[in-house]
Amino acid sequence: MRKLIAAINMTLDGFCDHTSMIADDEIHQHYNELLSNAGTLIYGRITYQLMESYWPSVVKNPTGNKPTDEFAVLIDNISKIVFSRTLKNVDWKNTKLKKEVIKEDILELKQQAGKNILVGSPSLIVALMQLDLIDEYQLSVQPTVLGNGLPLFKNGKDRVDLKLLKTKTFGCGAVTLYYEPTKR
């Protein structure tokens, strides 16, 4: 069975804002390794549009920064599923559009052979968490306090207890916390 991993950057005060995060070479290399071990990437509309508006252009016009350019190629080539009720179509290669998250569909996806499944959108992390489908959380806490923004676990309804598996510290001060849900 493939593992469903919630992987996202957040500020120290729990907000998700891609534009406020540190994206140095070490962080990019970390996510390159994560993408290399994944076969499918799941996004919501907002995160999809943010990523799709930038990374394909880096594939066409590389920056010259090896970890950044490698990330662009990896994310461009990976299979992507976008959940959106408002998008009519998606243009990024290897991308499928679905209207709603259905537990049985995600369970079927997990049963398929292949590499891990990554979810990287705050709203989808909460939705999949509420459906008890996430096998591991990889929360990269950035050394930034925003004071406001989109909280990662906004609209979470049920308590979820987690067990710390390990941590990874980066030179920039970011820390990735690896958790798995505990069964209650």
Image (cartoon, rainbow, N blue to C red):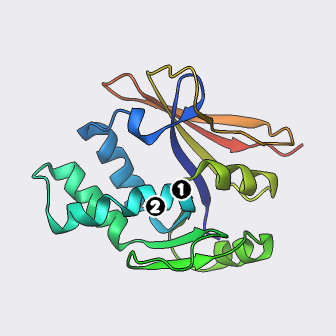
The type of residue carrying mark 2 is Gln
Q: Is residue 184 left or right of residue 56?
A: right
Q: Is residue 184 above or below residue 112?
A: above
**Is the residue 49 above or below the residue 6 in the image?**
below
Q: Position of residue 99 (x, y in %)?
A: 68, 75
Residue beneath label 1, please? 46
**Residue at x-position 53% and y-position 56%:** 46
Give the residue number, with chain letter if any, for mark 2.
49
Q: Residues within 10 Å of mark 1 (few under 14, many from 20)?
A: some
Q: Toward the viewer: 150 or 6?
A: 150
To which quarter of the image does residue 85 belong? bottom right
Indicate the position of residue 52 as horizontal and vertical percent values.
38, 64
Question: SS at mark 2?
Answer: helix
Contact (CB < 8 A) between labels 1 and 2?
yes
The answer to whether residue 43 is left or right of residue 76 is: right
Marker disc for residue 183: none
The image shows residue 133 at horizontal and vertical percentages of 74, 59
Residue farthest right in this picture? 184
Judge whether residue 114 can be spotted in this image: yes
Q: Front-most of 1 and 69?
A: 69
